[in-house]
Amino acid sequence: MTNHILNTLTSLNISYEVLEHEPLLTIQDGLEVEQKLKIVPCKNLLLVNRQHVFFLLIVFGDNRVK
């Protein structure tokens, strides 16, 4: 799966950087990785409507979703 995604990004001339880290099991783990890698955190929310259509909402970590 990972190779397929990276190959697709490359074929579309989309620049990217791969950052590897240990599994994040707690919020504290995420904060430590955020500081170590100097990245902006994000929130991922998987939503589904009554028609069973799925949406993945990704927002910056400090944003509130209402």
Image: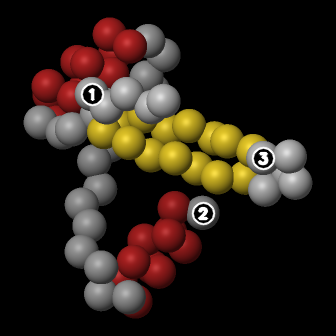
Q: Which residue is mark 2?
A: 1
**Which marked residue is nearer to the observer: mark 2 or mark 1?**
1
Q: Is 21 displayed left or right of 49 in the figure?
A: left
Point out the image quarter for the N terminus. Answer: bottom right
Mark 3: secondary structure: loop
Q: Specify the label residue 62 is tagged with.
A: 1
Judge left or right: residue 33 versus residue 5.
left
What residue occupies the far right of the structure in this picture?
A: 51
Q: Secondary structure at mark 1?
A: loop
**How far across and down, in percent of the image, does residue 52 sit?**
85, 51
Asked if residue 11 can be seen in this view, the reply is yes
Comparing 22 with 33, the one in front is 33
Q: Nearer the viewer, residue 30 or 60?
A: 60
Q: Amino acid at mark 1?
A: Asp
Q: In this rendering, which labeled residue sits more in front, label 3 or label 1?
A: 3
Residue 7: name its quadrant: bottom left
Residue 33, horizontal then vertical, whole percent? 25, 26
At x 24%, y 60%, the residue is 17
Note whether 54 is above or below 34 in the view shown: below
Asked which quadrant contains residue 6, the reply is bottom left
